[in-house]
Image: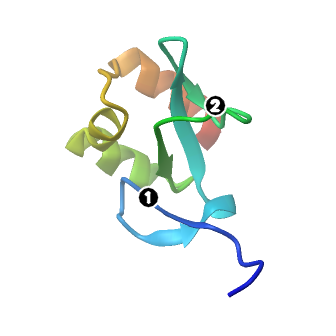
Amino acid sequence: MLGSEPRRTCVGCRQVKPRSELRRLAVVDGKLVLNPRRIAGRSAYLCPTPACWTLAEKRRAVERALAVPITTEDWDQLRQGILS
């Protein structure tokens, strides 16, 4: 399909969705960043729903996808930035 939007998998619920429906997480200069702009490299995608974020935290899915430890404080900051 020419011109179709790229699809990504949510690391929380494991559903494949269009990239625009998901939130991207990446590590930039050693810090976890939500929706980085034009940053190449490893990233993880999550649905913008509390259930997916809770499941991803419980399964440590983002940590595995990005190969970095994520603290409880980082998760709290992410939730405040995306779920409020």
Residue 33 % position (x, y): 58, 25
Q: Identify the residue at horizontal 41%, vertical 54% (top origin).
A: 52
Residue tagged 2 = 81
- Seen from the viewer's position, the closer of residues 49 and 22 is 22
- Count numbered badges in the picture: 2
Marking on residue 10: 1
Q: Mark 2: few, some, or many residues within 10 Å (few <14, many ≥20)?
A: few
Three-letter residue code for mark 1:
Cys
Residue farthest to the front, as pictured = 2
Q: Answer whether labels 2 and 1 touch (C-beta < 8 Å).
A: no
**Residue 65: quadrant of the picture:** top left
Q: Identify the residue at horizontal 24%, vertical 41% (top origin).
A: 58
Q: Identify the residue at horizontal 52%, vertical 55% (top origin).
A: 49
Structural distance between the alpha carbons of marks 2 and 1: 18 Å
SS at badge 1? loop
- Seen from the viewer's position, the closer of residues 17 and 43 is 43
Decide: is 43 above or below 31: below
Residue 17 % position (x, y): 54, 70
- Seen from the viewer's position, the closer of residues 76 and 5 is 5
Three-letter residue code for mark 2:
Gly
Earlier-in-chain disc, 2 versus 1: 1
> Position of 13 compared to 74: left or right?
left
Residue farthest to the left, as pictured = 59
Decide: is 27 above or below 8: above
> Position of 39 compared to 32: left or right?
right
Marking on residue 27: none
